[in-house]
Image (cartoon, coloured by chain):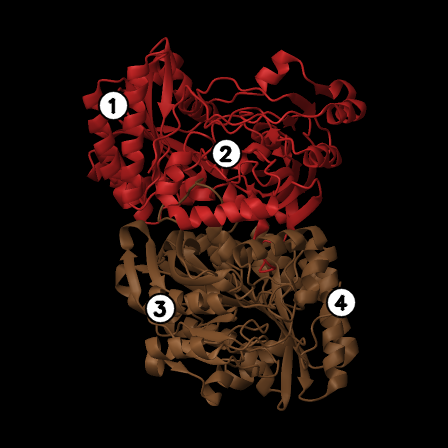
Chain colours: A red, B brown
Amino acid sequence: MNAPLPNEVLPAYERRAAPRAMLEALRERFGDRCSTAAALCEQHGRDESPYPVTPPEVVVFCDSTDEVAFVVAQASAHGVPVIPFGVGSSLEGQLLAVQGGVSVDLSRMTRVVHVNAEDLTVTVEAGVTREQLNREIRDTGLFFPIDPGANATIGGMAATRASGTNAVRYGTMRENVLALTVVTAAGEVIRSGSRAKKSSAGYDLTRLFVGSEGTLGVMTEITLKLYPLPEAVSAAICHFPGVDAAVRATIQVIQMGVPIARCELLDTNAVRAVNAQSRLGLRESPMLLMEFHGSPASVQEQAETVQAIAAEFGGEGFEWASTPEERTRLWTARHKAYFAGMQMNPGCRSVTTDTCVPISRLAEIIEASVADADASGLPYYIVGHVGDGNFHLAYLVKEGDAGQRATAERLSMQMVQRAIALEGTCTGEHGIGLHKMGFLEGETGAGAIAAMRAIKRALDPGNIMNPGKIFAL
Amino acid sequence: MNAPLPNEVLPAYERRAAPRAMLEALRERFGDRCSTAAALCEQHGRDESPYPVTPPEVVVFCDSTDEVAFVVAQASAHGVPVIPFGVGSSLEGQLLAVQGGVSVDLSRMTRVVHVNAEDLTVTVEAGVTREQLNREIRDTGLFFPIDPGANATIGGMAATRASGTNAVRYGTMRENVLALTVVTAAGEVIRSGSRAKKSSAGYDLTRLFVGSEGTLGVMTEITLKLYPLPEAVSAAICHFPGVDAAVRATIQVIQMGVPIARCELLDTNAVRAVNAQSRLGLRESPMLLMEFHGSPASVQEQAETVQAIAAEFGGEGFEWASTPEERTRLWTARHKAYFAGMQMNPGCRSVTTDTCVPISRLAEIIEASVADADASGLPYYIVGHVGDGNFHLAYLVKEGDAGQRATAERLSMQMVQRAIALEGTCTGEHGIGLHKMGFLEGETGAGAIAAMRAIKRALDPGNIMNPGKIFAL
């Protein structure tokens, strides 16, 4: 396996400039919605990763699939890179314009095109955020459960195959995208999938585009599954004597087939951080934050089962959050753990891991990673979607401290090697982007990468769609 | 949309003969397991579709992934077609050797490679059948729910993206395959996916191979999700005044979010046929056959909810099958509906449809299709995975009666056009094969087919993997 791409330097790609004819064509069609202003380009040349800002040459704000097709057709004709942009919440450098080009900003495409409440489906434009979606469908009695924390766009979530806290019950974007409208690298508009719940009609293009991080085309409309709002929801926290005990209790819950809706681990450091930020007054020990969905009777039954399992592993202080306000407070704290962790350590940036392993190996990889982190002396915290075998260990390194950064990257690489040896993956939900390109080959082997490259070349022969990401060509 | 491929004639592909050197190399390595015997080749040149037998030139029985890789490498070197073969239960002509070539018989690859009960995963060789799998894992307390009726191989089920009666709760092969070992068209062995429950690591090759009907490579090992055997299982039947009422009750059940495990429709004709074959003494009216999985309390609650909904739609005669024997008897009858329907009409063959629509449109398409079928005077019956919006209407046509056959194909095409207009698909679970190639383009449009063709050419430049299926190149 190759080392991860260092965070300070970017690969030395050549930038591909847009010719004047193309810029003029874009200006003519888009007017003020086409800009080469430095501040705007810089804002579109970064995401939540620690890489240096790498701006595109031009930003175009599109209002429709046809407009996206126009931009991509121009880019295709001139061999200029295209990078789809939503709200910029990706974590692995997916949005950096390492070869220059056009940032296609989809954040104005915020139409909820059609809610089919009877079929539990909705079609949205790619720029709709998950919070907007859930606001707009609230009165249908349905909701879209995928929740990666950030208020990402549905397009961005589909592009990185995102998941988050509800995935243990509702699946990830892989399971919840039914159909797509995609602008291909040639600037043509195609449709994949349908609103039917299942299909055996040809190659599964939908799932090929989901998770392709903008490298195969621009998703402009997305049809999603929705779910009935559960009749009853109940959240609980439970404290454990150690991370290990919390993880082992989780394993048991999953193996018993309890349909738990959320099952999140916070280690002592993470609890301390959210306490400091949100004044929650939580006991500072490893903790599971859980949620149960169903009928009142089913929620009751699930909770009793889980409480009994937790007790077996030394879990105590089982506390219920029964009002929506209390639940919101707890989940908001969980979602803010990332920022809370950094605020505890001013002047630090975080190097965050995203390994995911078969759940029986979860305790093993967390224990080993904690031992390594403790030995390194770096501050860190752990949050995890442990019901899925996925966790994030964030190393907090002093901004500009190359030694600490190198230590964190070394530990991160060790953890990925461990995850792969345990039949897991280097990324459960953040994607490859720039940062994990070195890991991908170690994980899938040269043969699978060769197949991915062949597909990329077939669907994007000019290598204009978000070039330089996932793998080198 | 083009007409479906007529059942009596096959497209006039050129057969690509295996050169003597290749046949000798295969004989040398496989001995008795390589055969050109006419009877064996004929047995490998058909499936459950009504096409004329179209034998391969040679059949090779492989025992391992390496052996498959050897055969494919030979075929690749000589430009000879390769058709993976399991038990021959596909329905749309997927297995016919329309261009000759090698049938790679995987039915000896029946090893359950590894059961990971703690992770709810299992890895099997492609020739393991679903019944064998469930027998072998019985003492783990887990099961594999996907049940297409036929005792198909897991490889065949993955290749057609199969589903069946349990899909409404457990999903299809799309949702339940975690990882694959695949022999590529170049004869190389690659791995896709991992045992981790979720991943964002690069293109989703696993789901690209699932449903590709042998046209992109040979799947030799498959890692599947397993589920805890439900603590309680209960089956029920309920009679309705009409198909329409049964369908509307189903829609309501799904929209309420009841986690029903199976929800099957049989129309009066299907009930009559299974009665005649299995002496079930069922009342001969449209019927739902349902199953509930969960804790005893949850099963009770689901059943009460469904019973109340059924009553609203005129459902009556709600009967429980509480013993495993009774349940088996009912489900066996359901699975035999296909043969029972044909036995009711001696000398007939069936032309079976497989449309799947958003559930809100299900009543509409079934009503229209029933009206058309009644007007045509052809005998027919309907069975359906109505919880998924998927149903099969089988027209029974006299063997050799070209007029009846043409009527059935015309009605089938009308139904597909209707399904597509209702945002559905021409095939919920049987695949495209030869028979539905004309439908696929109408469904997905030229752009999506062009993308599929580009992927096919990229991964199989010599067009040796099950050529002539899904789409023409």
Residue name at image x 73 percent, y 21 percent: A33
> How many angstroms separate mark 4 from mark 2 (CA)?
45 Å
Q: Chain of mark 2?
A: A
Is residue A82 rendered to the left or right of residue A314? right
Decide if residue B308 is in sight here. Answer: yes
Q: Chain of mark 4?
A: B
Q: Secondary structure at mark 1?
A: loop
Which mark is on residue B414? 4
Which mark is on residue B67? 3
Q: Give the labeled residue for mark 1.
A: A285
Quadrant of the rendering where the C terminus of chain B is positioned: bottom right
Q: Secondary structure at mark 3?
A: helix
Q: Give the labeled residue for mark 2.
A: A469
Q: Do discs 4 and 2 share a chain?
A: no
Q: Is residue B114 above or below residue A384?
A: below
> How many angstroms separate mark 1 from mark 3 (CA)?
54 Å
Whether label 1 touches label 3, CB < 8 Å: no
Amino acid type, callout 4: Gln
Decide if residue A194 is in sight here. Answer: no
Whether label 2 touches label 1, CB < 8 Å: no
